[in-house]
């Protein structure tokens, strides 16, 4: 058996980083991976400006309360002129600090009579001034290649005047659901059939990971059909991902089909849920075979496939983990790393009562996955690692 860490390392090492890029307008680049470092040609702010509505003045020789002559008014978007000694400028948030001024007094600390300003309390040098370049310095790298662009990144790119960005081409992923027992929602169930839930859950996880998904629907448990669909999918996709059929039962044909077309490693990973996991190559496409049980496929996707796809897409997405207190106890150490569906209640992780690998309600109920390392017992109140599901999107 491989440990989770060994399997993760091997998968990441096998991730060939996508090098094809395209250039997109900022608004089209949400969720995409930046292909090259973006260097700012500007300083941001581009000029010293006021952080407050108030009065720009010079604090030299200031003895409170001091009066100034209000000689000008500078709103955001305007530029003022130099202050003469004894003068102040009415100024608004975002307006450039006029030369000769070195502080802004908040209007709440001032009283004004006509053009005569009285300031109560001495402002310090630089007070309420946002300095040129305090956010971004000219020629600084603002966002590094490999970063996935979210709301904050797009905002910052716009702030430095970038309208279009080079991003990595999205991965094309073919998704296959194996199993003669599977029926599609919207069709009636024949005796012995179940609905195909992996197709929807894994497709959603793939799209959240930024992939373009081709849904190849249900593949029957037959060697030839499986092989033919895999061969077609591999010819037109970067990654082929299947669920089910990777155990070594008589009805599991994925292993033999992939081996007939390329190379496959069937890994027994010390993980619960999710032991059978396959990966390999068909032609130039990567192949990943997830277990069929819905919770197993979900968990193995989160633990192995999500970081793999991020690396394959030229980025990185380490699994987010926070420390929480165990709201449960585990009295017998297991030999596999467990990912338990849990909810946070007052900072403590409470487990869903049924942790079976087929119980998808556990994942819906959960806020995240508690990680219990192999060989470890847990006492209530002890710190444990927790993967918040909301942080995976
Ligand atoms: P397998 O790995 O093919 O032996 O499947 C393991 C278990 O997962 C069986 O109970 C299957 O019926 C179930 N399963 C496999 N594929 C799916 C699917 N796409 N949706 C829901 N359950 C599935
Ligand atoms: Mg099956």
Image (cartoon, rainbow, N blue to C red):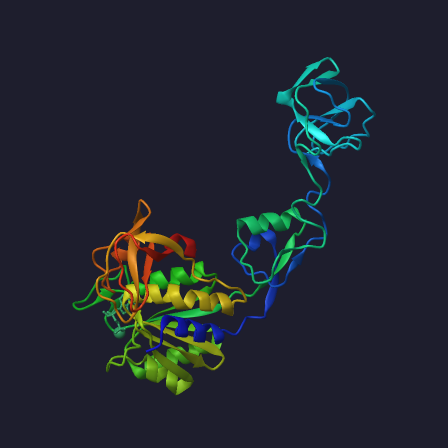
Quadrant of the image containing the C terminus: bottom left
The residue under the point 65% across, 27% down is 53
Question: Residue placed farthest to the bottom in the image?
Answer: 260
384 to the left or right of 108: left
- Residue 270 seen by the camera: yes
- Residue 214 seen by the camera: no
Front-lying residue, 71 or 110 = 110
Q: Quadrant of residue 112?
A: top right
The residue under the point 50% across, 70% down is 312
Question: Residue placed farthest to the left in the image?
Answer: 191
Quadrant of the image containing the N terminus: bottom left
Front-lying residue, 125 or 279 = 125
Q: Quadrant of residue 204?
A: bottom left
**x%, y% of residue 209?**
45, 61
Q: Quadrant of residue 82?
A: top right
Count of marks placed on residues:
0
> From the viewer's perspective, is residue 94 above or below residue 203?
above
**x%, y% of residue 380?**
26, 54
Front-lying residue, 192 or 285 = 285
**x%, y% of residue 230?**
39, 78
* Ligand 2 quadrant assignment: bottom left
**x%, y% of residue 385?**
36, 58
The residue under the point 63% across, 57% down is 165
The residue under the point 25% across, 62% down is 187
62 to the left or right of 245: right
Front-lying residue, 293 or 308 = 308
């Amino acid at each position: 058996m491989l440990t989770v860490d060994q399997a993760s390392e091997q998968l990441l090492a096998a991730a060939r980083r996508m090098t094809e890029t395209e250039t997109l307008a900022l608004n089209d680049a949400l969720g995409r991976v930046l292909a090259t470092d973006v260097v700012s040609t500007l300083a941001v702010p581009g000029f010293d400006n006021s952080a407050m509505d108030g009065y720009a003045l010079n604090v030299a020789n200031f003895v409170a309360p001091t009066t100034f002559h209000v000689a000008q008014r500078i709103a955001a978007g305007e530029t003022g002129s130099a202050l003469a000694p004894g003068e102040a400028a009415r100024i608004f948030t975002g307006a450039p600090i006029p030369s000769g001024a070195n502080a802004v007094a908040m209007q709440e600390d001032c009283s004004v009579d006509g053009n005569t300003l009285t300031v109560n309390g001495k402002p310090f040098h630089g007070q309420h001034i946002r300095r040129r370049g305090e956010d971004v310095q000219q020629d600084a790298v603002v966002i590094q290649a490999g970063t996935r662009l979210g709301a904050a990144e797009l905002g910052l790119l716009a702030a430095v005047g970038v309208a279009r960005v080079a991003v990595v081409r999205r991965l094309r992923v073919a998704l296959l659901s194996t199993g003669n027992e599977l029926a599609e929602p919207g069709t009636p169930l024949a005796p012995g059939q179940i609905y195909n839930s992996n197709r929807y859950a894994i497709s959603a996880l793939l799209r959240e990971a930024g992939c373009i998904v081709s849904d190849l629907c249900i593949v029957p448990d037959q060697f030839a059909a499986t092989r033919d669909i895999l061969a077609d999918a591999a010819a037109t996709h970067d990654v082929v991902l299947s669920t089910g059929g990777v155990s070594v039962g008589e009805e599991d044909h994925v292993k033999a089909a992939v081996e007939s077309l390329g190379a496959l490693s069937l890994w027994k990973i010390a993980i619960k849920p999710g032991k059978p996991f396959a990966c390999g190559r068909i032609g130039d496409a990567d192949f990943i075979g997830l277990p069929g049980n819905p919770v197993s496929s979900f968990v193995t996707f989160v633990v192995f496939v999500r970081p793999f796809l991020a690396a394959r897409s030229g980025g990185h997405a380490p699994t987010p983990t926070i420390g929480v207190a165990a709201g449960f106890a585990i009295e017998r150490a297991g030999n596999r790393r467990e990912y338990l569906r849990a909810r946070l209640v007052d900072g403590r992780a409470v487990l869903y009562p049924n942790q079976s690998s087929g119980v998808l309600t556990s994942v819906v109920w959960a806020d995240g996955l508690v990680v219990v390392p192999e060989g470890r017992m847990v006492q209530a109140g002890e710190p444990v690692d927790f993967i918040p599901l909301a942080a995976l999107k």
